[in-house]
Image (tube, rainbow, N blue to C red):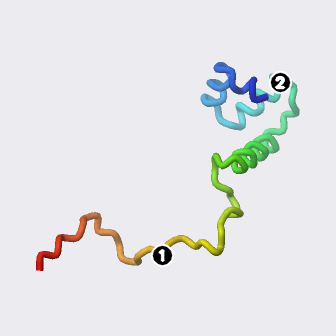
Amino acid sequence: VCERVERPEVSEFIEASRPEVAVAALCRRWNFPVEVERWLEMADEAMEHYGFIPPEDGEDDDPEDPPAPRSAAPASGKPKPWDTG
């Protein structure tokens, strides 16, 4: 399947189409079962596994490594003036 998807005409078709349309058309073309939701879920899982997209359920979040705290003060957008005092 990877070799087929890498063909220029196929990759252009995929890029130009909605995911559901591309998957259904390619399933018909290559005689795969037209189970669009199943194929899209499998693709999402593979992309998560290989790090192309973040996991949806936060399974990679490390509870012992919390994000750095952020200031509650709103950002002014301007740097503070130098203290010349």
Amino acid type indicated by mark 1: Pro
Q: Residues within 10 Å of mark 1 (few under 14, many from 20)?
A: few
Q: Secondary structure beneath disc 1?
A: loop
Residue on which the image places disc 1: 69
Residue on which the image places disc 2: 30
Which residue is found at the position 72% from the left and 27% from the top? 5
In the displayed structure, 77 sits above or below 15; it is below
Which residue is found at the position 16% from the left and 76% from the top? 83
Q: Secondary structure beneath disc 2?
A: loop
Q: Residues within 10 Å of mark 2 (few under 14, many from 20)?
A: few
Residue 66: % across, % down: 58, 73
Relative to 80, 38 lies left or right: right
Please tell me in which quadrant of the rendered image residue 37 appears: top right
Please tell me in which quadrant of the rendered image residue 75 appears: bottom left
Relative to 74, 53 lies left or right: right
Q: Which residue is nearer to you in this view: 83 or 76?
A: 83
